[in-house]
Image (spheres, helix red, strand yellow):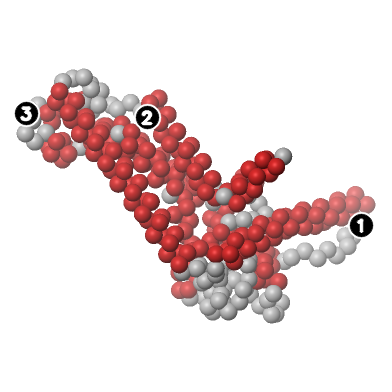
Amino acid sequence: MEKLQTVLDLQLKQHRALGYGLVSLLTAGGERLFSTAVFQCPCSAAWNLPYGLVFLLVPALALFLLGLVLNARTWRLLTGCCARSSRSRARGCGAGLRGAVVCAQLGASAAVAPLTWVAVALLGGAFYECAAAGSAPLARRLCRGRAPACEAQLPLAPCLPAQGPDAQGLLRELKAQSQVLGWILIAVVIIFLLIFTSVSRCLSPVSFLQLKFWKIYLEQEQQILKAQATEHAMELAKENVKCFFECLHPEECNTPSIKDWQQISSLYTFNPKEQYYSMLHKYVNRKEKTHSIISKEGDAVIPVLGFVDTPGINTTAEL
């Protein structure tokens, strides 16, 4: 039991890193399956390039869109945004800038799987070999100094690897180019992640230990909120069903209004003058009941605090 509890604690603490790792492994496995069982290069000068690019880029686009759909923060940003009043939309460029920052963070999170797909596909080389063999400019460059029939035979090279030493040499060169591009992509992504993580942590308005405490608080808040919401919904449902069958008028039940739900569901913004760990925390400590907490002077979206918007009562699977 102690070992199981240790594993569960590790999963709770490192769920984001484990999730990204699992997504990367599944994506890499899916790419290898596609390249061996599904992909068949047409070996045609007209179709090699589009066919190879489709297998290289379209699954990456699908994975990117799927990453956006499965991110709870996406729906926190989009839900109800079209129904907001023109007054709230016209608060100024600050709200638009905050939205742009959040969209950039969402895009970066969703890019893990597609970048993994493209990198593994380039390291494998099959998609690039097929696409490059159908590119006329690349064919002219590769066939420079070779036999006159090289450009005509290049589109057939992926289907006839044993055609001759020239064809094998072309395939080796194409695979080398693909693998070099794959390693360059991996290096660029790692460097970008290292720089982004370092800069965001360096600009963090709170300390390392306070970030740890913040995450613990959010976990506890969401657990209690879900339990209280379940209990409140059950009581409300029981009262309504009872009144329906007994033809009675229901007793007054204090339930948060639409505006209340909208305020605690909005994206978190940090204000150095106040120390609130969530929109719920900010809402219950507002000075006036009619005071809006959605936007305020001095509020800013801090990249390192993006985890505040991730948890919620409903997970994406339940939506």
| Percent of width and height locating residue 208 | 55, 64
Amino acid beneath label 1: Leu
- Numbered badge on residue 35: 2
Q: Which mark is residue 25?
A: none
Disc 1 crowd, CA 10 A, few/some/many (<14, 14-19, 20+)? few
* Image quadrant occupied by the N terminus: top right
Q: Is residue 9 above or below residue 274?
A: above
Q: Nearer the viewer, residue 104 or 184?
A: 184
Is disc 1 placed on a helix, strand or loop? Answer: loop
For disc 3, the marked residue is 148
Q: Residues within 10 Å of mark 3 (few under 14, many from 20)?
A: few
Read off the residue under disc 1.
248
The residue at the point 46 percent across, 50 percent down is: 110
Residue 33 appears in view: yes
Q: Residue 281: x and y, percent?
A: 67, 69
* Residue at image point 54% right, 45% down: 18
Cα separation, mark 1 vs mark 3, equals 93 Å
Rendering coords of residue 279 (x, y %): 63, 67
**Spatial distance from mark 1 to mark 2, Cα to Cα?**
66 Å
Q: Earlier in the sequence, mark 3 or mark 2?
A: 2
User: Is 237 placed left or right of 147 in the picture?
Assistant: right
Q: Residue at x 27, y 38 (%)?
A: 178
